[in-house]
């Protein structure tokens, strides 16, 4: 499956299968993590709606960052995490659920589905740099 298909799969998990944003991203990135479906669902359970309040970091970004930590084995993760945050902010316009859901012309700045898609795409953009 290509990167765009993985991103679309994450959106499908969010919109049609009952996953929250973090779970959808983690599940779509399952092959990157080495963890089971059940483990990923449990890990991502508390990271929806900006960690339950809509005031905090977007769950999709958290999911991608968790996958990044697993991918790097904790080696240099902070450096790549900074890159991921920067890429996500550029793609979505904000980092917190509250800001992403703020209304601009009657629409959210970035709907959940697009946050999920962008988190996956940003994850792959950053992980392309892991061995550079």
Image (cartoon, rainbow, N blue to C red):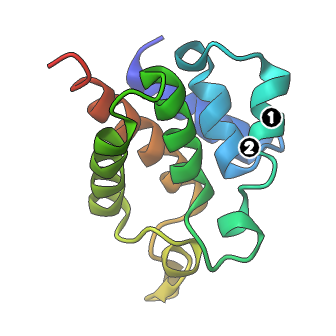
Task: Name the residue rendered at 80%, 26% in the picture.
Answer: 39
34 or 14: nearer the eye?
Answer: 34
Res 52 → quadrant:
bottom right
Q: Which residue is mark 1?
A: 41
Q: Position of residue 65 (x, y in %)?
A: 49, 42
On screen, residue 2 above or below 12 = above
Task: Name the residue rendered at 14%, 19% in the picture.
Answer: 132
125 or 130: nearer the eye?
Answer: 130
90 or 75: nearer the eye?
Answer: 75
Which residue occupies the extreme left position in the image? Answer: 132
Contact, mark 2 vs mark 1 (Cβ under 8 Å): yes
Q: Classify residue 45 as left or right of residue 79.
A: right
Q: Classify residue 34 as left or right of residue 121.
A: right
Which residue occupies the extreme front position in the image? Answer: 75
Q: Classify residue 2 as left or right of residue 125.
A: right
On screen, residue 85 above or below 7 = below
76 or 81: nearer the eye?
Answer: 76
Q: How many marks overall?
A: 2
Task: Name the residue rendered at 71%, 65% in the picture.
Answer: 51
Res 59 → quadrant:
bottom right
Task: Name the residue rendered at 56%, 38% in the picture.
Answer: 66
3D distance between C-alphas at marks 2 and 1:
5 Å
Q: Position of residue 110 (x, y in %)?
A: 47, 67
* The disc label shown at residue 77, or none: none
The secondary element bearing badge 1 is classed as helix
On screen, residue 31 above or below 59 = above
Crowdedness of circle 2 by 10 Å Cα count: few (<14), some, many (20+)?
many
Q: Position of residue 2 (x, y in %)?
A: 41, 15
Q: Position of residue 114 (x, y in %)?
A: 49, 53
Q: Which residue is mark 2?
A: 44
């Amino acid at each position: 499956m290509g990167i765009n298909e993985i991103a679309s799969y994450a959106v499908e998990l969010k919109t049609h299968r009952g996953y929250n944003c973090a779970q959808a991203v983690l599940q779509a990135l399952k092959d990157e993590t080495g963890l089971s479906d059940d483990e990923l669902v449990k890990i991502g359970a508390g990271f929806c709606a900006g960690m339950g309040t809509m005031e905090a970091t977007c769950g999709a970004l958290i999911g991608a960052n968790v996958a990044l930590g697993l991918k790097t084995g904790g080696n240099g993760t902070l450096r790549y995490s900074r890159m991921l945050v920067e890429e996500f902010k550029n793609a979505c316009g904000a980092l917190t659920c509250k800001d992403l859901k703020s209304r601009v012309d009657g629409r959210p700045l970035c709907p959940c589905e697009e946050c999920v898609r962008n988190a996956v795409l940003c994850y792959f953009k950053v992980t392309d740099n892991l061995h550079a």
